[in-house]
Image (spheres, grey):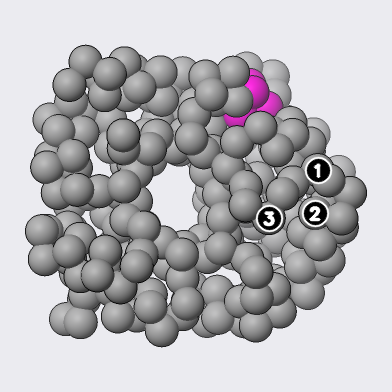
Amino acid sequence: MMKVFAHRGASGTYPENTKSAIIAAVDLAVDGIEIDVQSCLDDYMIIHDTWLDRTTSGRGKVNACSKEKIQQYDAGNGEVVPTLQQAIDWVDDKTLLNLELKHTFSLDKFVELIESNVSAGKISRDNLLVSSFDHHQLMWLKQKLPWVKIGALTASIPINYSEFAQKLHAYSIHVDKNFINHEFVADAKQRGLQVYAYTVDKVEDIELMLEYGVDGIFTNFPCHTQMTLQSL
């Protein structure tokens, strides 16, 4: 069965990357939850954009604001932008947590936070997947935490297909549903990589990903996607 990952939580129904979206995805017993991680001045926040404008009532760049300031803004339906620690606590190791590193810095602090949560039993090694379009960050992270599963993001079909991900010792490649073909998927599988496609909501796209032999899909509507897969 193709895996279903809630993209920014159940973001088609609830404000993306918020507590309600994350909790709803946990309640659906999805195979995983993908959320976005960005650095602010003094913490890691769960927000997709580098600017606060689109998803909150605030203005300015995330990395120029403090956690306290960011959490004063409305992230939709009166919710606040969570910290990474809050998101880990809410998921409570009930499913895989895919942390996509967006504009993150001081990654040594990120490593410390992950290690302390693993030690405390708040998240298991198997239930953590760290992904990014910045493959340099992934390489650095893999050197610091050799056990961590990393997902190499791309929005292209590279000349050498998934060779880049194998060189990173990645667990998975995360590919754009519009830039994928049979050869790309076959190459990844031959290299022992999981293939996850984003962002897949429409029935026709779900069917196409099944045809390609994709291992999992990121969806904004995990409930609908689960039902669709059960009916196919």
Above or below, 28 against 64 in this view is: above
| Badge 2 element | helix
Identify the residue under disc 2: 118
Dot 2 or dot 3, earlier in sequence:
2
Identify the residue under disc 3: 125
Question: How many neighbours does mark 2 have within 10 angstroms: few (below 14), some (14-19), or many (20 or more)?
Answer: some
Identify the residue under disc 1: 122
Quadrant hosting residue 156: bottom left
Please report the residue visible at 30 percent of the width from the left and 80 percent of the height from the top.
163
Amino acid type of the residue that numbered disc 2 sits on in the rendered structure: Val
Please report the residue visible at 36 percent of the width from the left and 64 percent of the height from the top.
193
Image disc number at residue 96: none
Question: In this orientation, which residue lies closer to the viewer: 232 or 135?
Answer: 232
Main SS category, magenta section: helix
Above or below, 184 against 91 in this view is: below
| Badge 1 element | loop
Residues drawn in magenta: 18-23
